[in-house]
Amino acid sequence: MTSATFSVGDLASRTQLPVKTIRYYSDIGLLPQSDRSPGGHRRYGPAALERLRLIRQLRALEVPIAGIARVVSGELSLSGLISAELSAATRGILCLRWREAALRALDEAVDDAERARRLHLLERVQRLPHVHADLAEAWSRVIPHSVPARLRDAIIAQTAPEPGPAPSCEAVLAYAELHVIAHDPGFGFYWGAWTTADKASLYAGMQHATVATAEAFARGEAPPAQVTDDVAALVAKGRGVDDSPCFRAALGPELRWAVHHFRRYAAPLAVLTGHAANVAHSHCLLLDALPGPASPGDTQRAALVRLHRNLPMPLPEWPA
């Protein structure tokens, strides 16, 4: 051996790596090109020794060979590789915490029937970060396309919160409940606002009214009369009808009937946000403050038929 080169055995001795591993790294191009001895054996320079030490250190941190190859080829800097691996590790920790919370939710089930129910729920929310993207997409589908992107994003941020970094069992179950509700075929009926021509104005007005209702709730008050008046007038204008007492008497029952999915949405959303006065709860409080009877019945059904008799879409089935 000359002083400037090393055999595979020399490299193995100096790096504590197996000869077979060093040959593999050489074969896949991780080590600088080597010379050959007169007998045909591979010889490596000092750069190969330093490269092997770097590879050994990165592999000790479980950095994939593919990432190391990008560094030694010059495609990626070492700092860039470390940043990418740190991001991957953070995502991996989130996935493990999410899985742990889901398994704890199953372990803490009070009986086999409840465990089976939870297992059915949790099947929907096991792939992070797809869990959040899927819920956001469900909302994006039901919000009319004419609603401005900024308002659409604000609504989705309120109704489809990001999963927390250390979710509880209750949070994972609540997220699964939101998925079930948002993917129900009837969920989009209300949010599609198909009775309204100017959907963008309706959504903007309802968003403002919901915020005002939440503020009133925080003060222990009912929604201001002016807010409910504004909502009734806004809906009437969007449908091209007069805002009359008869219209309002039918509007309250109609909206309360149509929003029953969102009423279910409020409880799991409160678990995730930590706020009882979330957008779902406030929206339902607003609708409850509109005139008309609050419980389903023949009077409501008759009012709905009157409102919908000239519309092209059939009246959906009364919810259970």
Image (cartoon, helix red, strand yellow):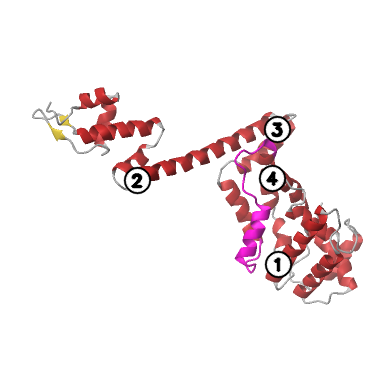
Q: Please tell me which of labels 2 and 3 falls first in the chain.
A: 2
Amino acid type of the residue that numbered disc 4 sits on in the rendered structure = Leu
Residue that carries the numbered disc 3 in the rendered image: 115
* Numbered label attached to residue 272: 4
The answer to whether the residues at label 2 and label 3 have Cβ atoms under 8 Å apart is no
State the extent of the magenta-drawn residues as a range: 143-170
Q: Are marks 2 and 4 in contact (CB under 8 Å)?
A: no
What secondary structure is marked by label 3?
Answer: helix
Pick out the residue farthest to the front. Answer: 219
On the question of residue 194 being in view, the answer is no
On screen, residue 192 above or below 279: below
Judge whether residue 203 can be spotted in this image. yes
Comparing 302 with 32, the one in front is 32
Query: In whole angstroms, how far apart are the C-alphas of marks 2 and 3?
Result: 48 Å
Question: Residue at point 74% right, 48% down?
Answer: 275
Look at 51% across and 38% down and name the residue there. Answer: 92
Tag 2 residue = 77
As helix, strand or loop, the secondary structure at mark 1 comes to helix
Towards the viewer: 174 or 299: 174
Q: In the drawing, does residue 276 fall left or right of residue 126? A: right
Q: What is the C-alpha distance between the residues marked 2 and 4?
A: 39 Å
- Asked if 201 appears above or below 111 in the picture, the reply is below
Judge from the rendering whether residue 149 lies leftward or rightward of residue 6; answer left or right.
right
Give the residue at mark 1.
Answer: 204
Q: Where is residue 59 shown, x and y percent of the image? A: 37, 32
Of labels 4 and 1, earlier in sequence is: 1
Find out whether residue 105 is within the magenta segment: no
- Dot placed on the residue nearer the N-terminal end, 2 or 4: 2
The kind of residue tagged 3 is Arg
Separation of marks 2 and 1 at Cα, in angstroms: 47 Å
Q: Nearer the viewer, mark 2 or mark 3?
A: 2
